[in-house]
Amino acid sequence: MSILNVVILSIDLLRDSFYALQRKASPGVDDVRWQEYETGLEDRLVDLHSQVHRETYRAKPSRRVYMPKADGRQRPLGVAALEDKIVQQVVVNSSSRSAKGNKYMRRVLNQAAHAAARSKGTDFQAVFRRLLPRLGYQSAVWAIAHRLCRLVWKILHEGIRYIEQGIESEPKLLMHRAKYIAKQLRKFGYNVQITPANSAPA
């Protein structure tokens, strides 16, 4: 699901975003300028709105331009097509108006994540221990909090039943990571074979 499906997109939002754009900005690969798009604006916005809601809207590639720098070098810039700018502006405006959240709910979620990370023999504890060296304590706790939120959402919206996998999930996670590392090493020309430690030759 794209972020456009989360934003309540309307023609009024698209129109406001269009009039918030810079009118003298360079065109993208569509070669359409602001003044040209304003001609027949309502029909264009209805069509764009329909594309987004039918999920047939596809962003166009950015046009590459180069801006001169003070030291004589050039800085590459990507110029989006005009309709892409309109949609991007809607997302930015909707994101900037979003609430910061309830501080009391944040506190409860933090406490729940702490409790889950300390629960012995659980999948949450295994994930917390794996993340702790890399992220640090507080970031690892918030990673667990994010995992809890996703789990609760899936239980409520998809009606699934949560089954605790326990500490048995840790070997699976380690094997998955080992396979990924081995794949990356093979790209650099190394011959890697994964062998469990208990089956290694003496």
Image (spheres, rainbow, N blue to C red):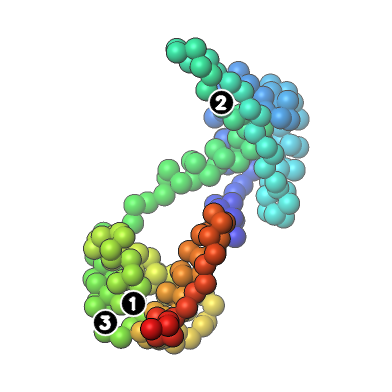
In this rendering, the answer to whether 150 lies above or below 94 is: below
At 42% from the left edge and 45% from the top edge, which residue is drawn?
Answer: 97
Classify residue 76 by image quadrant. top right
User: Where is the C terminus found, in terms of image quarters?
Assistant: bottom left
Q: Which mark is residue 76?
A: 2
Where in the figure is residue 23, as x and y percent of width and height? 60, 21
Q: Is residue 116 visible?
A: yes
In this rendering, the answer to whether 46 lies above or below 154 is: above
- Please indicate whether residue 62 sits to the left or right of residue 186 in the image: right
Where in the figure is residue 153, as x and y percent of width and height? 46, 72
Q: Is residue 15 visible?
A: no
Mark 3 lies on a secondary structure that is loop
Front residue (pair 107, 122) = 122
First reached walking from the N terminus: tag 2 or tag 3: 2
Q: Amino acid at mark 1?
A: Ala
Q: Which mark is residue 119?
A: 3
> Counting other residues with Cα less than 10 Å from the Cα at mark 1, is it few (<14), some (14-19), or many (20 or more)?
many
Tag count:
3
Q: State how far apart marks 1 and 2 are (Cα).
A: 45 Å
Tag nearer the camera, 2 or 3: 2
Mark 1 lies on a secondary structure that is helix
First reached walking from the N terminus: tag 3 or tag 1: 3
Where in the figure is residue 62, as x and y percent of width and height? 64, 33
Q: Amino acid at mark 2?
A: Pro
Q: Amino acid at mark 3?
A: Ser
Mark 2 lies on a secondary structure that is strand
In this rendering, the answer to whether 74 lies above or below 64 is: above
Q: From the image, tell me which residue sits under label 1.
A: 126
